[in-house]
Image: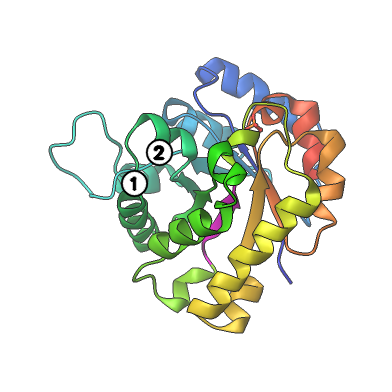
Amino acid sequence: MRKPIIAGNWKMNNTISDSLALIEEIKKHKLNENVEAVVCVPFTSLSEVKKAIESTNIKLGAQNLHWEENGAYTGEISPLMLKEIGIDYCIIGHSERRQYFNETDETVNKKIKTALKHNIKPIVCVGETLEEREAGREEEIVKEQVLKAFEDIDIKDVENIVIAYEPIWAIGTGKTASSEDANQMCKFIRSIIKRKYEEKTGENIRIQYGGSVKPNTIKELMEKEDIDGALVGGASLIAEDFAKLVNH
Ligand code: 13P
């Protein structure tokens, strides 16, 4: 059985005080314990949010990390620094990082390996652009992203990875993929993992959908067989909406 996972990606929003205020609001809601709730907060808020969620079931995630443990990489954050804070998850290869910060399938693969080495669970993002979908190339693009991300990843580690299918045209646009299209792609991604590893590995890996997920669309998405959760931007910044997503 795959445990559903709803992860909020706060992106570059919320100072430390804003973050604490949002967490306190979220804590006022009773969250379904059968669903894993994760907040992926800015680096500067990680330590304080960690303390604030101590007595809850909410898990903590970062939004990026460097593949080296230390060195001359000005402005970067090492997995050791994140591990010390006690994060559980880290988003890797978000399309905004691929688009604006030169993230490539190769750096995504290196980052997944370093995260796993430090017992940080990667949430690996894949997804096509509108142009690619209109050209009917969405499966080809996503397949390449998935296979490159999982290059030389050992079968024993695969179930610690979460894949987030986020079609770029659905992010922050209010355009959600239909639940059928989202499920079809999640199923396709699962089939890639089954073929590369074992049937069981593909059955067990969790695959999220992301892109304009809101309280009024979550139920339909989560009812689909191959969608195990959501990676949520905008709606995760509103405590009540985040709670509704977790409690869908
Ligand atoms: P929105 O939910 O704001 O569309 O963002 C999706 C996303 O990019 C989550 O990582």
Find the residue positioned furthest to the front.
135
Quadrant of picture, ligand 1: top right
Image coords of residue 182 (percent x, y): 71, 51
Q: Residue at x 86, y 48 (%)?
A: 220
Q: Nearer the viewer, residue 145 or 27?
A: 145
The residue labelled by disc 2 is 98
Q: Residue at x 14, y 42 (%)?
A: 71
Residue 87 in view here? no
Image coords of residue 132 (percent x, y): 54, 44
Q: Of the residues shown, which amino acid type is indicated by label 1?
A: Thr
* CB-based contact (under 8 Å), mark 2 and mark 1: yes
The residue labelled by disc 1 is 104
| Magenta-drawn segment | 160-165
21 above or below 230?
above
13 above or below 88?
above
Q: Is residue 97 left or right of residue 49?
A: left
Q: Secondary structure at mark 2?
A: helix
172 above or below 58?
above
